[in-house]
Image (cartoon, grey):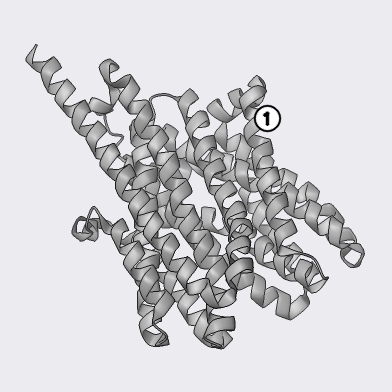
Amino acid sequence: MLRKISFILFLAITLSGEGMLTVTLLWTILDKGGSAINIGLILAIMSVVPFLIQKYVRPVRTVLTHRPLQVFALARLGGLVVLGLPLLFPEEMMIYSLYLLAGLFSVILFLSIQSLEAYMSHMVLEGALSADQASNTLQTSIQIGAFGGNDLAGLLLSLGGFFTVMIGLAVSLGIGMVLPYVASFFAAALNPQKREQEKTIKQTEITEESRKKILQLTVFAVALLTVQLASFNFLLPILFHDVREWGSLEYGLVSSAAGVGAFLATIIGRWVRYVPHHSFLLIAVLDIFIAFFAFWPAVVIMSFLLGFVFNRNRIVQRSMMFAYIKNKEETTLWSSRSTLAFQLMKAIVPLVLVFPLFFVGNQQAGLIFSCIGVIVSAGMYLIYSREKGLEKGLLENDKVKLAN
């Protein structure tokens, strides 16, 4: 148990760098008169770059397929190289240099998350972990890293400014470089008794078409859930600041409550069986409540539940992806598609939301947020129903095969 917790914390510490960088760059760029829209465009464009490289450059794809931990370490090393300029010349960083830094680190983040997903998928294929264990371990690390990185960025910015945050980021990247050398030590604790590979309906030859359709649906689900996440992060500050005129304390509590709820979803353990399968339908209800009820203690509670429901469904979709991946080559393909869906939606959604706000005004931010909640819930219902329908078809086909 101690080694398992240590592994999660190890990943969380190195992944916290992305949270630190995001908060610091956004704050510094806006402070220098830059544009959040420009940041979003850069991140969206640069997120596509590593996806295209591995799609069309075979050696890169091969390395990601067979040595994901080495790719993770190289990505962290690349981050340290990129940090050379802001560390050596922090006062000389102009606005366009910060845009470039944001774009380069979007590539590093893409490769880091994808390589970790590929590694966890390998563990599932080898029978060392169940799909649920792999998904929960990775999501817990990402969640703790995000919380810690965001909080640490604010603290370091107040203590020493941009340069101090860059030092903290360099430390987190350096820690990640040793992952290939310590992973085997930590992995033994995740499931000490290597499981025999389960002969499930997921591995039968007659289900190939349905299996790929399920994997495609998991990517669509990730994209849809990211729309909800990006909308929450973009619209709620506008709703609370411009519409309700709440202070930073109220907004901080609401945002923190969502984070705590998301974290609880990763550690719920055996109690997960009490979570309804269609919990994603609550996204619409909770979004509407947050959008139209101005009693902030109640909004804090609703935000907590929203964070829980969102992250629980994200874990379910990642588990399904791990469960239906058939070989190591597919880990690269589907982990890259999943990561691309997440990165692109996170960058593009705020850009898209600028347009309705421009025409109807910031006063309608709550209405837009509630509409997004309804769309996400409806979309998740269609995706989940289709996934379960395909799984049922797999089961029926397997029964027919056994009967014959």
The residue lying toward the viewer, choosing from 172 and 396, is 396
The location of residue 367, given as percent across then percent down, is 46, 71
Task: Specify the quadrant of the image occupied by residue 128.
Answer: top left
Q: Is residue 9 left or right of residue 310?
A: right
Quadrant for the N terminus, please.
Answer: bottom left
Residue extending furthest toward the left: 403
The location of residue 21, given as percent across then percent down, is 68, 61
The location of residue 24, given as percent across then percent down, is 71, 67
The location of residue 238, given as percent across then percent down, is 58, 75
The residue lying toward the viewer, choosing from 308 and 80, is 308
Up-down relation of residue 100 to residue 65 (above or below): below
Is residue 316 in sight in this rendering?
Answer: yes
Residue extending furthest toward the front: 359
**What residue sits right under mark 1 in the picture?**
53
Is residue 107 in sight in this rendering?
Answer: no
The residue lying at 53 percent from left, 55 percent from top is 10
The residue lying toward the viewer, choosing from 369 and 84, is 369
Type of residue at label 1? Ile
